[in-house]
Image: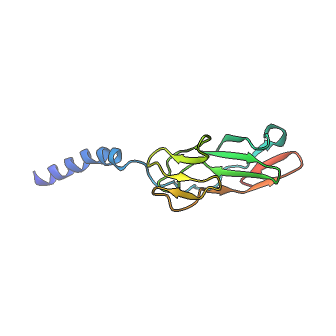
């Protein structure tokens, strides 16, 4: 009887622990997705654009100097982040962590910078993850 009560308690508590646990650590990718190819003429200079890259969202920003791609997941526990234009920072939806424009943590629990992806420029394309 004691053993079956323990098993039942464990089975019933697993969903509760998932709910209470909040977000999980950013999953380690099994492998990088195929490179994302974006036409340069569709990337206005200075504008933040979001694209799907495998199972995650990346932000791509083209500048006069080149192009930057950043994973839109908080480095604290893998929650989605978004750019707050009026305040000029990235905000984590889960724990209110903040990152500056350079992707560096400036407030809250995150300690590591946002993950940058490799961008290779050709005369006509930005290739993300190459």
Write down the quadrant of residue 112 in the picture: bottom right
Image point 75% across, 44% down: which residue? 46
Q: Nearer the viewer, residue 25 or 80?
A: 80
Is 77 on the left-hand or right-hand side of 125? left
Q: Observer-nearest residue: 108 or 12?
A: 108
**Rendered residue at 47%/54% (across/down):** 77
Residue farthest along the top direction in this orientation = 42
In the image: residue 40, left or right of residue 9: right
Q: Residue at x 83, y 43 (%)?
A: 40
- Where is residue 80? Give x, y as percent: 53, 45
Q: Between residues 7 and 14, which one lies in front from this camera angle?
A: 14
Image quarter (top left, top right, bottom left or bottom right) of the C terminus: bottom right
Residue at 71%, 53% (x, y): give it. 129
Residue 73 image point, x, y percent: 55, 49
- Number of numbered callouts drawn: 0
Side of 88 where 67 appears, left or right: right
The picture places residue 27, in percent across and down from the top left corner, at 51, 54
Can you tell which quarter of the image residue 41 is in?
top right
**Residue, far front:** 87
The colouring scheme, among rainbow, by chain, secondary structure or one colour, is rainbow
Q: Is residue 19 above or below residue 116?
A: above
- Looking at this view, name the residue that lies furthest to the bottom: 111
- For residue 26, side relative to residue 103 (left or right): left
Toward the right, the furthest residue is: 123
């Amino acid at each position: 009887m004691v053993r079956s009560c323990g098993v039942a308690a464990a089975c019933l508590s697993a969903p509760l622990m998932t709910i209470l646990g909040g977000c999980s650590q950013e999953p380690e990718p099994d492998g990088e997705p195929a490179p994302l190819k974006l036409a340069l003429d569709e990337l206005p200079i200075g504008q933040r654009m979001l694209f799907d890259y495998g199972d995650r969202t990346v932000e791509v920003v083209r500048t006069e100097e080149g192009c930057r791609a950043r994973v839109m997941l908080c480095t604290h526990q893998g929650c989605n982040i978004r750019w707050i234009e009026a305040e000029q920072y990235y905000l984590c939806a889960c724990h209110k962590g903040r990152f500056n424009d350079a992707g560096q943590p400036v407030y809250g629990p995150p300690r590591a910078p946002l993950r940058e992806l490799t961008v290779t420029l050709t005369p006509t394309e930005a290739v993300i993850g190459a």
